[in-house]
Structure formats: C-alpha cells, structure tokens
Amino acid sequence: MEQDAAGLRVYSSNLLHGLLQTSAYTREVIAATALTRTPEEVAALAEVRLARQAVLTRQGNPLKIWAVIHEAALRQRFPSRPTVMTEQLRRLLDLSELPTVDIQVMPMEASPHPGMTGPFDIVSFTGPWPTVVNLENLRGGFFLEGDDAAVFETAFDRVVAAALPVDVSRETIKAIMEGMQR
C-alpha cells in the first residue's frame, strides 16, 4: 500500500514502524516476532522491509509520514547488540530532517489518549481510493476503511495533541540517544 499512498500517519507504542527502522533493528525485531520463520525467511523479510523504505525518498512524490512514537519504544534495549538502539535513534533524527517526515514522541507521562489501546497506521491515497487503517498483530495485518477509518483519524488527532511537539521530540530523541551512549 505504501507504494501507492500519498500519506501515512502512524502511532507506534512498543515497536518502530518498518519505514523508520535501521537494518539491525529490523533483523532483531523480525527474529523476535516471526515465531514460525526460519533464519533464511527472517533475512528475506528484513530485506523486503528495508526495500519498502525507498518510498520516503522517491523522486517527485516521496511518501509523507507523520509518526507518533511512544517513548517506551525509544528506550528498547537489545542486550546482545547494544548499539542497535543508538543507531536507530540516529536514524530517526536523520529522517526527521526530511521535509516529508514528522516525528513526535509520546512521553511516558502523557495524559490518557486513544493510542493507549494499541498501535495503528492510517494510509491515505490520492484519487478514488479510500483511506485505510492497518492494525498489525503476530499473524499479519487487519484492514479497516470507511467509518472505521474515520474513527482512527479522529484518534490520531488526539494522539498528536497528547504527544510532544516535533522540535521537543527531536530533543527528547537526542537526549535518550546520548543517555544510551554513556
């Protein structure tokens, strides 16, 4: 869907969206969550996920992404590979410099918001296609549209209102990264 999409709004609570992941983060997460996959399948899935990221920098019409990421996802640790999150946070900062990427952090002390029920992606298209909501779980994605998608659009507005502003979010990501480097 991302290939044909004009915009993507994402709320991530415990896991960073695939379009924002580094190679190392992607491999670690897929290995941990793809319970029935062989190491070869994990490697192939990681390559596919990373190839999808080309939509962020494609010529002419890069995908516009607005991601709200819960602070808990930014503080994830990978004990066997301690530099994974530092590299991942650097990637988020680099992506946030693109004019088509907005990243906000949902602080640990945020007031209650609709994202507390779980992560979701809202995919918007130009032309005749409807907005679609993707809800992912261990077995794949579940898609909603129409009135159901409208509920998630309202929810995203409330999530954005509860999150830190973009500039404060960048500083928060920097501070978390610096804390990990110590």
Image: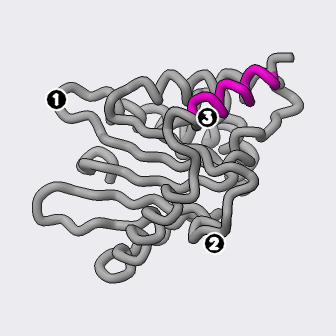
Magenta stretch contains residue 145? no
- At x 65% / y 63%, what residue is drawn? 138
Q: Secondary structure at mark 1?
A: loop
- The percent coordinates of residue 117 (x first, y second) are 63, 72
Q: Secondary structure at mark 2?
A: helix
Comparing marks 1 and 3, which lies closer to the viewer?
1
**Which region is colored magenta?**
169-180
Q: CA distance from mark 2 to mark 1?
A: 36 Å
Badge 3: residue crowd in 10 Å (few <14, some 14–19, many ≥20) = some
Residue 176 part of the magenta-drawn span: yes
User: Which of labels 2 and 1 is toward the front?
Assistant: 2
From the viewer's side, name the closer residue of 56 and 167: 167
Q: Residue at 39% across / 36% down in the picture?
A: 101
Q: Which residue is mark 2?
A: 117
Report the residue marked by disc 1.
Answer: 60
Residue 45 x %, y % = 55, 41
Residue at figure coordinates x 20%, y 35% from the top left: 61
Q: Is residue 58 left or right of residue 165?
A: left
What amino acid is at disc 3? Ala
